[in-house]
Amino acid sequence: MLHHLITSKTRLRLMLKFFLNPGTEGYLRSITREFGDSTNAVRVELNRFVDQNMLTYRMEKNLKIYRANPDYEAYNDICELVQRYMNWSKLAELLDFSDTANVFIKEEVTDNYLFHFVVEEESPDFQKDEVLHTSTGMIRVYRRNAEDILKMSETCKPFFYIGRIKNTDGCVPLGK
């Protein structure tokens, strides 16, 4: 649904990166590497988000570190929209996190999937793919160990880090 409204893939990826887990930060070159996009395309979209006050940045030496702006008037609405689009609460139900998990997004257009979740598992031999059917489509989840995730991040683009997700009392707070 959201990908039909937001036709710029770079803009949509930035929304997912910064509004699925609002504590996420990134700078131009790191985002460019994660997305596999051109530096100029990412820079243009970051500047548009900053101009609209949706993102803020701070300077750290010579780097602009971007993050979602919690003071933006539609901040909560955008977070909710993006989380619904990605079936974030269904992901938490599917994984039933006992503690925390690193979550990544892999973009791949196959069947009914556009974005796939990759979740880091501690077991070195554990590999499992799961599909969850929801009212808005399907969620595909790859469970991989850290070594496999590193390989995926080098070969699959876009492949970007969302953050750590923790399940407490049925809600899905996000944080690092």
Image: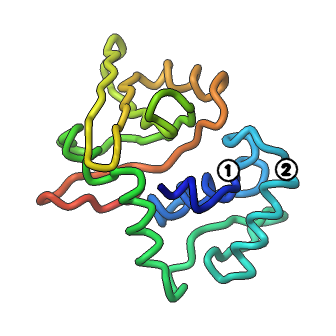
Kindly identify the amino acid type of the residue bearing the numbered disc 1: Lys
Task: Give the x, y percent position of residue 42.
Answer: 78, 55
Name the mark on residue 43. Answer: none
Above or below, 33 relative to 80: above
Q: Quadrant of the C terminus?
A: bottom left
Decide which of 1, 164 is in the foreground and name it: 1
- Residue beneath disc 2: 39
- In-image side of 21 versus 95 (left or right): right
Residue occupying image coordinates x 55% and y 62%: 18
Q: Is residue 169 left or right of residue 49?
A: left
Residue 65 figure quarter: bottom right
- Residue 144, relative to residue 40: is it above or below? above
> Residue 156 sits in which quadrant?
top right
Mark 1 or 2, nearer chain start: 1
Query: Vertical placement of 167 versus 73: above or below?
Result: above
Find residue 138 and report its horizontal and vertical position in percent: 34, 38
Q: Which residue is mark 1?
A: 9
- Residue 24 spot, x, y in % from top left: 53, 59
Residue lying furthest right: 40
Disc 2 is placed on an element classified as: helix
7 left or right of 77 in image = right
- For disc 2, the neighbor class at 10 Å (few under 14, some 14 to 19, many from 20) is some
Which residue is depicted at the point 56% across and 32% down?
109
At label 2, the amino acid type is Thr
> Which residue is situated farthest in the top direction here?
125
Q: Residue at x 67, y 59 (%)?
A: 11
Q: Looking at this rendering, what residue extends furthest in the left direction?
A: 169
